[in-house]
Image: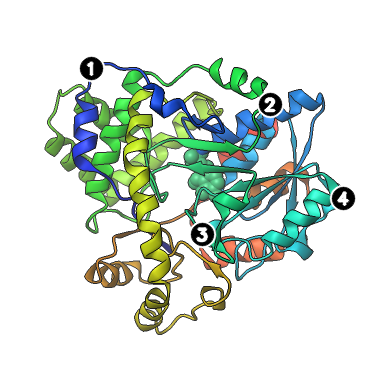
Amino acid sequence: MFVRARPKIDREKLHALIDTQSGSIPDELLTDRNKFFFNSGRSSLKWYLTYLKNKQNKSLVVGLQAFTCSVVTQAVLESGNKPYYFDVDKKYFTTLIGQIDFNKIDILILSHLYGIPNPDYLLIKEKCKELDIGIIDDLSQTLFSRIDHHCLEELSDCYFYSFGFDKPVSTMNGGMIFIRNDDLELQESYHSIKPESFNKEKSDLVRLLLYHEITSSMNYTQERRLNDRVDALIVYLARRKIIPMNAAMALLKLAGTKPLLIFRKIFNSWVHRIFSIKINVQRMGYLKRTYFQHVYPQFQKDKKFYYEIKEKTVSFFKKMFKDIQIPDYVTGNIEPSWYLRFPVLAKDPKTVIELLSDNGIEAGPYNWDRLSFEGFRELQHLNKDNYINSKQLTCEIINIPNWDDNIWKRLSNIN
Ligand SMILES: Cc1ncc(COP(=O)(O)O)c(C=O)c1O
């Protein structure tokens, strides 16, 4: 079980935006030509990989680590490119330079999981430059992590964020890709995409408010999956003001109780079978874009504080978790975004969360059940022994109880 920091939200701003009747994205939000906002992190990746494939007029081989969110594979496949997997280092949850077969790939997606930047980043970048391999940094789980006092955001020529619920900055669903390239075609391609509907955006903001409430206590159960159809119905009723927010909250809590979770699991797998769930690439709309622009500067302001308290953070973790080994990466030249996300391998997440909240840190338990490993074995018929660390991390350390089999069946039909 990993414990993750909960996103910080601005309730007042959310309420104000939920009550907004209409609007379009103001000009001041459109000035940064290198940042492209989408309805999810996976959409931003799919859009860019599709663009690269079309530009080069061939399917590209995209290197990625076996231990990462399965939707990264999904984006690669749906963009018409081919995934090529590497194993990970067990300490850093990322591929170190020795684990990457540079001769086999055209593009490299480098994942920086749990707030920990890849310690070989500068070496990998140099090598990729030499071989003309583009790097896309997956910063879905980190924010302002540093290497030698430089943020990955500054060092990278292309990175993407996810603004999902359990990410450092959240708009419930959303993503952004930064591309240090002023290609006009990119702009044209982006602006030809449909934005999210106003109602969808409102639902996301209502859901963000509600989920934030229900994860503030121990109502959040380990088995609970976010974003399913049952929750969507409750959110719909709240958004249309058919039921008040408090009632929606109570219903969400009820829907998260054990017997109902069993029912939901069956219901959801049935829904999955009927609907094909492809990545629907849309531009982020007015409400969420406005919300993001409102909260992001606060994170930028806070980052200085996070760096300053790094030492304090390390000793805090040492004190708190006597039974776990504090990895030495917290004391080297890389600085993980500890307070925003942190991996805690704990058997009893409830105690950990209570300890954290006593110390003013909000956290929630999450079971990350969409990690790749089983899937690509099925997809590419690879020898699982090549990915021994990935498998061990996924199956033994995280101890995922339920595999999402359906996604792999759907993916293998795409190619
Ligand atoms: C490492 C990583 N990459 C990509 C994603 C995809 O982000 P999104 O859910 O916004 O599509 C996630 C989200 O869980 C992630 O953790």
- Asked whether the viewer can see residue 415, the reply is no
At 79% from the left and 49% from the top, the residue drawn is: 129
Q: Which mark is residue 145?
A: 3
Mark 1, residue position: 21
Earlier residue among tags 1 and 3: 1
Quarter residue 411 falls in: top right
Mark 4, residue position: 103
User: Circle 3 — which element?
Assistant: loop
- The CB of the residue at mark 4 lies under 8 Å from ligand 1: no
Q: Quadrant of the C terminus?
A: top right
Earlier residue among tags 1 and 2: 1
User: Circle 1 — which element?
Assistant: loop
Kindly check if marks 1 and 4 are in contact, taking CB atoms under 8 A apart as contact.
no
Give how far apart the Cα atoms at labels 4 and 2 are: 22 Å
Q: Which mark is residue 51?
A: 2
Quarter residue 12 falls in: top left
Above-or-below relation of 214 to 151: above
Question: What amino acid type is highlighted by mark number 4?
Answer: Asn
Above-or-below relation of 63 to 175: below
At 67% from the left and 36% from the top, the residue drawn is: 76
Question: What amino acid type is highlighted by mark number 3?
Answer: Ser
Of discs 1 and 3, which sits in the foreground? 3
Earlier residue among tags 3 and 2: 2
Quarter residue 310 falls in: bottom left
Give how far apart the Cα atoms at labels 3 and 4 are: 28 Å
